Amino acid sequence: PSAMREVILEVPKVRWEDIGGQREVKMQLMEAVEWPQKHYDSFKRIGTHPPTGVLLFGPPGCSKTLLARAVASEAGLNFLAVKGPELFSKWVGESEKAVRSLFAKARANAPSIIFFDEIDGLAVIRGKESDGVSVSDRVMSQLLVELDGLHQRVNVTVIAATNRPDNIDPALLRPGRFDRLLYVGPPDEKDREDIFRVHLRKRPCSPDVCIKGLSVLTEGYTGADISRVCNEAATRAIEENFNASEITMEHLKAGIKRVKPSEMQSYEGLS
Ligand code: ATP
């Protein structure tokens, strides 16, 4: 039995413009992932080392996954995504094999990105096996071996995401591993306008829809919350009338009432 579901290889179709706000993170990702792959000779000539791995951290629903997919898409890189906890198998040896074959697949399909979602999930599972070495220790050491093997190799980049950076094994954060940390924070008022624009762009809206007004009404809402608000508004329009041809400000306000903002944890001192 395989330790993991088959890892899907894709070139995502997410553009930078599909993500509202996060200007700084977009720039940083371009610099850390796209430039070294596209301008390898320049980096070598000038003697600068691009990061081996990038860690995106911040509260849920604020576009970490979207950003990883966008940089792959914009740079034309193959993308392999895996969730931390998926790397575990109860079969002895299968978990390490899964990690090895994941990296082998990324190298075979270079230039590529491996995206580890919920990387903190690697540290929390602790089931001792008979020889006293836990599965998570085995997975972790295999992962470190693979990461160290990527060092100085520019055509495979690893990006990881977590909501809980304090739960990450510090060994992962040493130089030559996940050595670039980027904070992906909640949107401010201006960013929320951008996010509403992204989600309303492809939907028919009545002229009375005021993006600025929506942004003011959604203090504390994440990008994921705003996406839900827009969907609720569209649902509302249909509930009212099957022939509805547009979403009104009224529908959107009702959507905001229905969707409660996610609670934000504090990440102070970590960025
Ligand atoms: P998690 O930690 O829960 O995995 P995440 O930070 O990876 O969250 P995403 O999965 O990227 O968040 O975002 C979830 C959804 O929310 C996206 O598919 C998108 O619809 C919407 N969204 C979040 N942030 C933005 C944004 N800045 N612009 C547009 N849409 C956004």
Image: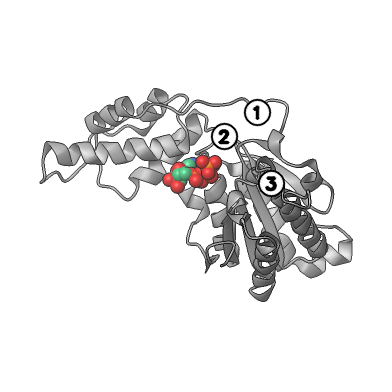
Q: Is residue 52 visible?
A: no
Q: Is residue 73 left or right of residue 24?
A: left
The quarter of the picture where the C terminus appears is top right
Marks 3 and 2 close (CB-CB < 8 Å): no
Left or right of residue 179, residue 213 in this image? left
Instruction: For marks 2 and 1, give the CA distance.
Output: 8 Å
User: Hey, what amino acid is under mark 1?
Assistant: Tyr
Q: Which residue is mark 1?
A: 267
Residue linked to disc 2 = 59
Q: Give the residue drawn at x 75%, y 47%.
A: 180
Q: Residues within 10 Å of mark 3 (few under 14, many from 20)?
A: many
Some atom of ligand 1 lies within 8 Å of the CB belonging to the residue at label 2: yes
Instruction: Report the Cα–Cα distance between label 3 and label 2.
Output: 13 Å
Secondary structure under tag 2 reads loop
Q: Position of residue 255 (x, y in %)?
A: 29, 31
Q: Are marks 2 and 1 in contact (CB under 8 Å)?
A: yes
In this view, the residue farthest toward the front is: 130
Q: Residue at x 69, y 36 (%)?
A: 167
Rendering quarter of residue 37: bottom right
Residue under pointer 3: 55
Amino acid type at image mark 2: Pro
Q: x%, y% of residue 62?
A: 52, 39
